[in-house]
Image (cartoon, grey):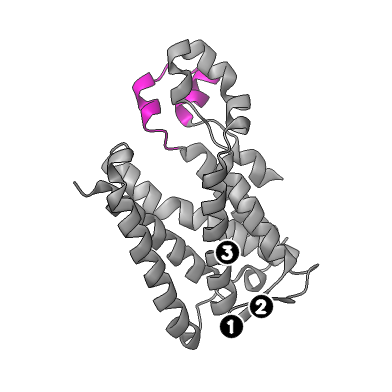
């Protein structure tokens, strides 16, 4: 619940305005990197570990087995090639990113999201749901599938700031809540659902959440580079 609440926090540009600290540059909202969401969500996962609500072993905080990598690496590599090609040929449909935004997308979402969905959440639900659902070369649980669903839903909850710029900053700071909840396009949900299944398979096949983190970061990096090539 704490993690889902973190997903609807506004970007820091809006947060400082809501708190009355300052009025940020509205042009920054065309580059809506939401550090607020990611930092708070990562702290939630760390809190779960420090409080002992889930153990490091349940979270998968261990290295992947070498035997599993012989299968996982080629599969992830093929997915990377497909996504890179798609990102390259559709690059003109995306706004260019600043270098620190590229670095953010390549590292931060993969670390935060995998640590929670395929680490903390999977570990907690693993106490309730046995691993009875087959995946290629491994098994998962209903808890894993719940994590995939929440992963897709979590990407549908976002702050849609640019659409409100024409109505003024005052409207923007008061309307972030319902705009966040209503922005949920189905194609995005389908894509994130498939990616969630891939990362779940990597996690279960290797037994390591770090393998899922690495796969997620590589996917985001392939998309970022594909979009950035001129």
Label 2 crowding class (10 Å Cα cut-off): few <14, some 14-19, many 20+?
Answer: some
Query: Which residue range is magenta in the image?
Result: 12-33
Foreground of the two, 32 or 6: 32
Foreground of the two, 44 or 154: 154
Q: Secondary structure at mark 1?
A: loop
**Residue 219 showing in the rendered view:** yes
Q: Where is the N terminus found, in terms of image quarters?
A: top right
* Mark pair 1, 3: CA separation: 14 Å
Q: Position of residue 204 (x, y in %)?
A: 60, 74
Residue with the mark numbered 2 = 139
Residue with the mark numbered 1 = 137
Q: Position of residue 22 (x, y in %)?
A: 44, 17
Label 1 crowding class (10 Å Cα cut-off): few <14, some 14-19, many 20+?
Answer: few
Residue visible at 43% across and 17% down in the picture: 165
Label 3 crowding class (10 Å Cα cut-off): few <14, some 14-19, many 20+?
Answer: some
Going by the image, does 33 lie left or right of 64? Answer: left
* Mark pair 1, 2: CA separation: 7 Å
* Residue 28 drawn in magenta: yes
Q: Upstream in the sequence, badge 1 or badge 3? A: 1
């Amino acid at each position: 619940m704490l993690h889902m609440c973190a997903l609807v926090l506004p970007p820091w540009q809006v947060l400082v305005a809501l708190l009355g600290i300052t009025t940020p540059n509205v042009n920054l909202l065309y580059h809506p990197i939401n550090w607020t969401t990611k930092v708070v969500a990562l702290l939630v996962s760390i809190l779960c570990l420090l409080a002992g609500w889930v153990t490091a072993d349940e979270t998968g905080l261990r290295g992947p087995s070498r035997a599993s990598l012989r299968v996982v690496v080629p599969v992830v590599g093929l997915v990377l090639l497909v996504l890179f090609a798609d990102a390259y040929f559709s690059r003109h449909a995306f706004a260019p990113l600043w270098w620190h935004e590229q670095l953010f997308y390549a590292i931060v979402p993969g670390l935060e999201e995998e640590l929670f969905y395929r680490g903390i959440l999977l570990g907690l639900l693993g106490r309730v749901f046995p691993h009875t659902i087959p995946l290629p070369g491994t098994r998962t649980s209903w808890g894993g599938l719940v994590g995939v669903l929440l992963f897709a839903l979590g990407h549908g909850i976002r702050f849609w700031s640019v659409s409100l710029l024409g109505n003024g900053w005052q409207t923007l700071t008061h309307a972030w809540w319902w705009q966040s909840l209503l922005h949920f396009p189905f194609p995005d949900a389908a894509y994130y659902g498939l990616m969630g299944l891939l990362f779940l398979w990597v996690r279960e096949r290797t037994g390591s959440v770090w393998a899922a983190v690495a796969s997620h970061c590589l996917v985001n990096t392939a998309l970022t580079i594909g979009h950035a090539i001129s």
